[in-house]
C-alpha cells in the first residue's frame, strides 16, 4: 500500500467522521428545537463534500427522520394553513435545482452563506415582523422555500418567516413545519433523482448518515422532555451565524 493509497483512506475516514458528526448535530437540533437541521447541515457539509454532493445527501437524510417528527408533533398540525404553501413550494424546487447545476459553486455557496447568516441574525434578534394579511405572501414564501430546498436542501428560512408573519402558535409552528418539510423533501429527492444527482459517491455517506440521524433524533426528543431549549437555541443560532460568515468569506 503506497503513500497515495494511505492518504486517500485517511481522507475518506476524516470525511466520514465529519459527516457523521454534522448529521448528528443537525438532526439533534431539529428534534430538540423543531427547526434548524438543514441550516446546520448545509452550513457545514459543503466544506466537506462540496455543494453538488451535500445538497442531495441531506435531502435523503431528511426523509429518514422527518416522518418521526411529523408523528411526534402531529397534534399541532393545521394542514389548511400550509396547503397553498406546499403547492407553491413544489413549483420552486425545479428552479432551485436548475440554478444548482448551472451557476458557479462559489457563487451558490456565497448566496447560501448570506441566507444562513441573514436567518441567524433574524432569529437571534427576535425581530417581530409585520403580520401577513394578504394571500399573495403564501405563494411568494412557498416558491422561495422550494427554490432554496432544490438548490441547498434548505427550505426552512422562508417558511419559518412566513409562520411568524401568520402568528402561528408554538405547537402549530412545530407541527406545520414538520409536515411542510416532509412533503418538500419528497419533492426535492424526486427532482434530484430525475436530474441524476444521486451519483455513486453519495451512497457511502448516506449509510454513514443513517445511524447519526437515528442517534440525533433519539437524543433530541429525549432531551426535549426535560430541558427548556432557550439557551441551546441561542448557541445554535450563534453557530449558524458563524457558519454563514464562513461560507460568505
Image (cartoon, rainbow, N blue to C red):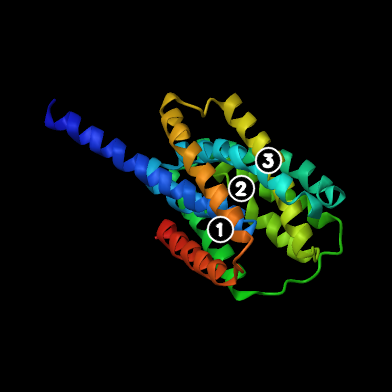
Where is residue 5? Give x, y as percent. Answer: 19, 29
Question: Which residue is under mark 1?
Answer: 115
| Quadrant for the N terminus in the image | top left
Q: Secondary structure at mark 1?
A: helix
What mark, if any, has residue 67 been given in the picture?
A: 3
In the picture, residue 97 is in which quadrant? top right
In the picture, residue 64 is in which quadrant? top right
What mark, if any, has residue 11 been given in the picture?
A: none
| Quadrant for the C terminus in the image | bottom left
Question: Which residue is under mark 2?
Answer: 148
Note whether 208 is above or below 35 in the view shown: above
Along the viewing direction, whichever of 208 and 182 lies nearer the viewer: 208
- Single out the mark in the foreground, 2 or 3: 3
Q: Is residue 216 left or right of residue 129?
A: left
* Sequence-first disc among 2 and 3: 3
Q: Is residue 217 left or right of residue 48?
A: right
Mark 3 and mark 1: Cα distance apart in space = 26 Å
Along the viewing direction, whichever of 28 and 6 lies nearer the viewer: 28
Q: Secondary structure at mark 3?
A: helix
Mark 2 and mark 3: Cα distance apart in space = 21 Å
Mark 2 and mark 1: Cα distance apart in space = 9 Å
Note whether 213 is above or below 123 in the view shown: above
Q: Secondary structure at mark 2?
A: helix
- Single out the mark in the foreground, 3 or 1: 3
Where is residue 31? Give x, y as percent. Answer: 61, 53
Q: In the image, what residue occupies the spot 58% across and 63% down? A: 119
Q: Is residue 229 left or right of residue 89?
A: left
Mark 3 residue crowding within 10 angstroms, few (<14) / some (14–19) / many (20+): some
Amino acid at each position: 500500500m503506497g503513500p497515495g493509497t494511505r492518504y486517500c483512506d485517511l481522507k475518506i475516514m476524516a470525511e466520514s467522521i465529519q459527516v457523521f458528526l454534522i448529521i448528528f448535530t443537525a438532526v439533534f437540533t431539529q428534534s430538540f428545537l423543531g427547526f434548524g437541521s438543514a441550516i446546520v447541515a448545509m452550513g457545514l457539509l459543503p466544506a466537506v463534500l462540496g455543494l453538488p454532493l451535500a445538497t442531495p445527501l441531506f435531502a435523503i437524510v431528511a426523509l429518514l427522520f422527518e416522518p418521526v417528527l411529523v408523528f411526534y408533533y402531529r397534534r399541532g398540525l393545521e394542514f389548511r394553513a400550509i396547503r397553498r404553501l406546499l403547492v407553491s413550494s413544489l413549483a420552486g424546487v425545479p428552479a432551485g435545482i436548475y440554478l444548482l447545476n448551472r451557476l458557479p459553486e462559489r457563487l451558490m455557496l456565497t448566496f447560501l452563506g448570506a441566507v444562513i447568516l441573514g436567518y441567524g441574525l433574524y432569529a437571534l434578534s427576535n425581530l417581530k415582523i409585520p403580520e401577513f394579511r394578504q394571500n399573495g405572501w403564501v405563494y411568494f414564501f412557498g416558491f422561495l422555500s422550494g427554490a432554496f430546498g432544490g438548490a441547498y436542501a434548505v427550505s426552512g428560512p422562508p417558511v419559518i418567516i412566513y409562520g411568524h408573519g401568520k402568528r402561528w402558535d408554538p405547537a402549530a409552528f412545530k407541527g406545520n413545519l414538520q409536515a411542510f418539510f416532509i412533503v418538500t423533501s419528497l419533492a426535492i429527492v424526486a427532482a434530484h433523482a430525475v436530474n441524476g444527482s444521486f451519483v455513486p459517491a453519495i451512497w457511502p455517506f448516506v449509510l454513514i448518515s443513517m445511524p447519526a440521524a437515528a442517534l440525533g433524533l433519539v437524543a433530541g426528543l429525549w432531551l426535549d422532555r426535560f430541558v427548556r431549549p432557550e439557551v441551546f437555541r441561542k448557541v445554535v443560532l450563534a453557530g449558524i451565524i458563524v457558519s454563514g460568515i464562513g461560507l460568505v468569506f
